[in-house]
Image: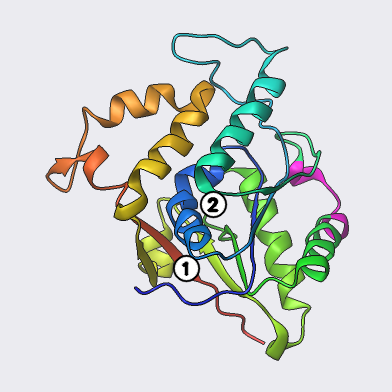
C-alpha cells in the first residue's frame, strides 16, 4: 500500500529490537519523508535470553549494552526522539493498568500523533508485549472518536491468522531493506544468531533473508465504540 501522510508517529514497544523486527522499514520510510517519529521503549530488555553469538555480554553488562544497541538501531531508522521509559524487563505485565494507560496518555497528549505503532493485544505472544498493546489501545480508546490517532498493531501469535485474519496493512520496505537489516544488526546481543540462521532458511520458496525483510505487515486496529 501507499504510505498514508502522517503528522507525527509514536512507536510504543516494551523491548529494544521489537521495533527492528516489526517496523524498522516503515519507520525509515516515514523519516525519509520528513515525518517526526518518537519511539517510547519501555524497558532495556535486560532479561533478554541471548548474550551475543558468540557471547560478549554478561547478565551484569547486558542492560547497558542493550541501551547502546538501541541508540545505534535508532540511527539506522532515523529516529532522533528516543524515550527510554525506565520500566523493568519481564515486569511490564505486573505494572498497574492505570499507570500504564497514563504513561501512554501522557505521550499522546504531548505529541499529538496521527499514527501509533504497537502490539496487537491478544496476539503478541510475550506478556510484556501484551501489556504494552493493551495499554496503548485503552489509552486511544479513551480519546473521542474523531480525535483518535490511527493504530497499526503487530500480531504474530500462531492463532492470529485463524482468529483475526491476514494483516490489512502491508508496506513494501524493500527500498530501505539495508536500513532494516542494519537496525537488526545493531541489536547484536539478541539478533546475531537469527541473522546468521535466516540466510540458511527457506520461506515460501525463497531465502528468508530475501522475503521477510521486504514487507512489514500490520493490523489497522478497529475500535468497536
What residue did someone put label 1 on? Answer: 219
Residue at screen point 72% across, 73% down:
140
Q: CA distance from mark 2 to mark 1?
A: 12 Å
- Image position, residue 107 (x, y; %): 79, 62
Prevailing secondary structure of the magenta residues: helix
Asked where in the image residue 84 lies, by quadrant, the reply is: top right
Classify the position of the C terminus by image quarter.
bottom right
Viewer-side residue, 120 vs 159: 120
Viewer-side residue, 201 vs 170: 170
- Image position, residue 139 (x, y; %): 76, 69
Q: Is residue 125 visible?
A: no
146 in the magenta segment: no
Asked where in the image residue 6 lies, by quadrant, the reply is: bottom right
Left/right placement of residue 199 relative to residue 34 reads left
Viewer-side residue, 194 vs 49: 194
Q: Which residues are magenta?
A: 92-99
Q: Secondary structure at mark 2?
A: loop
Viewer-side residue, 135 vs 151: 151
- Image position, residue 186 (x, y; %): 50, 30
Crowd class of label 2 (few under 14; some 14 to 19; many from 20; radius 10 Å): many
Asked where in the image residue 36 lies, by quadrant, the reply is: bottom right
Amino acid at each position: 500500500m501507499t504510505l498514508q501522510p502522517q503528522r507525527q508517529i509514536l512507536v510504543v514497544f516494551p523491548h529494544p529490537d521489537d521495533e527492528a523486527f516489526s517496523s524498522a522499514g516503515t519507520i525509515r520510510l516515514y523519516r525519509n519523508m520528513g515525518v517526526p517519529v518518537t519511539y517510547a521503549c519501555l524497558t532495556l530488555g535486560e532479561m533478554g535470553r541471548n548474550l551475543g553469538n558468540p557471547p560478549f555480554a554478561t547478565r551484569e553488562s547486558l542492560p547497558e549494552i542493550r541501551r547502546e544497541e538501541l541508540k545505534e538501531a535508532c540511527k539506522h531508522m532515523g529516529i532522533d526522539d528516543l524515550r527510554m521509559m525506565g520500566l523493568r524487563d519481564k515486569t511490564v505485565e505486573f505494572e498497574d493498568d492505570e499507570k500504564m494507560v497514563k504513561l501512554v496518555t501522557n505521550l499522546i497528549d504531548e505529541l499529538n500523533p496521527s499514527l501509533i505503532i504497537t502490539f496487537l493485544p491478544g496476539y503478541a505472544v510475550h506478556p510484556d508485549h501484551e501489556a504494552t498493546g493493551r495499554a496503548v489501545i485503552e489509552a486511544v480508546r479513551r480519546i473521542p472518536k474523531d480525535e483518535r490517532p490511527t493504530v497499526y498493531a503487530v500480531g504474530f501469535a500462531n492463532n492470529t491468522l485463524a482468529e483475526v485474519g491476514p494483516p490489512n496493512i502491508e508496506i513494501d520496505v524493500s527500498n530501505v531493506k539495508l536500513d532494516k537489516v542494519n537496525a537488526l544488526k545493531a541489536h547484536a546481543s539478541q539478533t546475531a544468531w537469527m541473522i546468521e540462521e535466516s540466510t540458511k532458511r527457506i520461506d515460501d520458496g525463497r531465502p528468508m533473508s530475501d522475503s521477510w525483510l521486504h514487507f512489514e505487515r500490520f493490523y489497522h486496529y478497529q475500535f468497536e465504540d
